[in-house]
Image (cartoon, grey):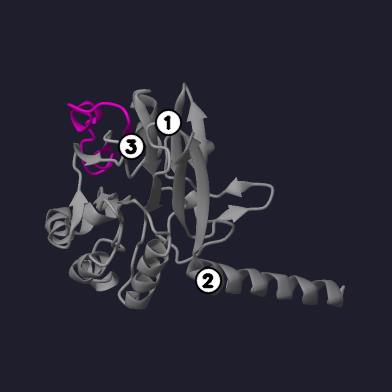
Amino acid sequence: MKKFFKYLIIIILTVIIWGLFIEPNLLIVRHYKIKNESLKGTKIVFATDFHLKQNEYKKLRKIIKKINAQNADIVLLGGDYVNGQVYQKTLHPKIIAKESGNIKSKYGAFSVLGNHDFWLDGNKIKPELQKYGIQVLSNQNKSIKLPNNKKLYIAGVEDLSTGNPDIKKALKNTASPVILISHSPDIFPEVPSSVVLTLSGHTHGGQIVLPFYGPVFVPSEFGKKYVSGLIEENNKRMIVSKGIGTSILPVRFGSIPEIVVVEFYY
């Protein structure tokens, strides 16, 4: 019995150390391949839910280095750069924006803002990012001319909980192919099938995922349906990234931080 409790304590301590100090500081690259003739040969990096705390300047530089190492054609960002709702708990948005200006890609970087960004001060964060070359899309779209003389449209909607996402407005005057960025995956049922791919975050993959149970909490009205990964329904595709940082609790367990690489083929 003593040995049992000894091993139990060791297991509990290992889990605590892993969840608090190891897994939150990991960063993997998750790859997806999607078939699309118009976008054949195009590589996209998607990063979201940074949740950068005051002392995480080096972490931000590590993230950007990892993004740049993918040699992307386009970099897309899903919001929640900051942590919490007060400046005392987050890396300053000016620092985040300036460092994000070092992101490299062939056709630029495009972003939406998340709920944490707006809770802190979305009206200030948006111009800071744009000052350093990160185009923030608020129910808007931008076109990119691809090598085959076709256009790719990048559309972005406002955050579901702090803004007013207007998919129709975001897709105005677009033609396929379109990639849509939404911080929350909960808009997916309203996305038309003309959108090649929707990219979202917000869920952190559940952040704490227990064996045999799954995610402890998913901030989605659809529960675990849109928690993470590639989701296909009604001839539509969405990738929900587990994101990078932590929210509420500084813990990750069973949901390793990630950036997403999407490569299109035909």
In the rendered view, tell whether residue 119 sits above or below residue 40: below
* Label whose residue precedes the other's in the sequence (2 or 1): 2
Which of the pair 256/221 is nearer the observer? 256
- Magenta stretch: give its range: 152-180
Task: Name above or below for residue 56 compared with residue 146.
Answer: below
Q: Element at badge 2? A: helix
State the residue position of label 1. 37
Disc 3 and disc 1: Cα gap in Å? 14 Å
The residue lying at 47 percent from left, 21 percent from top is 234
* Residue 228 visible in the shown view: no
Query: Where is residue 198 shown, x and y percent of the image?
Result: 38, 37
Label 3 vs label 2, nearer the camera = 3
Kindly indicate the quadrant of the structure image that contains residue 256.
bottom right
| Residue type, numbered disc 2 | Leu
Q: Is residue 6 left or right of residue 31?
A: right
Dot 3 surroundings within 10 Å: few (below 14), some, or many (20 or more)? many
| Residue at the disc numbered 3 | 179
On whether residue 171 falls in the magenta region, the answer is yes
Q: Which of pointers 3 and 1 lies earlier in the amino acid sequence?
A: 1
Q: Quadrant of residue 200?
A: top left
Residue 40 position in % (x across, y down): 42, 38
Please provide percent x and percent y for residue 229: 52, 43
Q: Given this view, does label 3 or label 1 mark the residue nearer the observer?
A: 1
**In what element is the residue under mark 3?**
strand
62 on left or right of 167:
right
Q: What residue is shown with label 2?
A: 20
Front residue (pair 27, 118): 27
Q: Three-letter amino acid code at disc 1?
A: Glu
Q: Which image quarter: residue 149?
A: top left
Q: Considering the image in quadrants, where does the N terminus appear?
A: bottom right
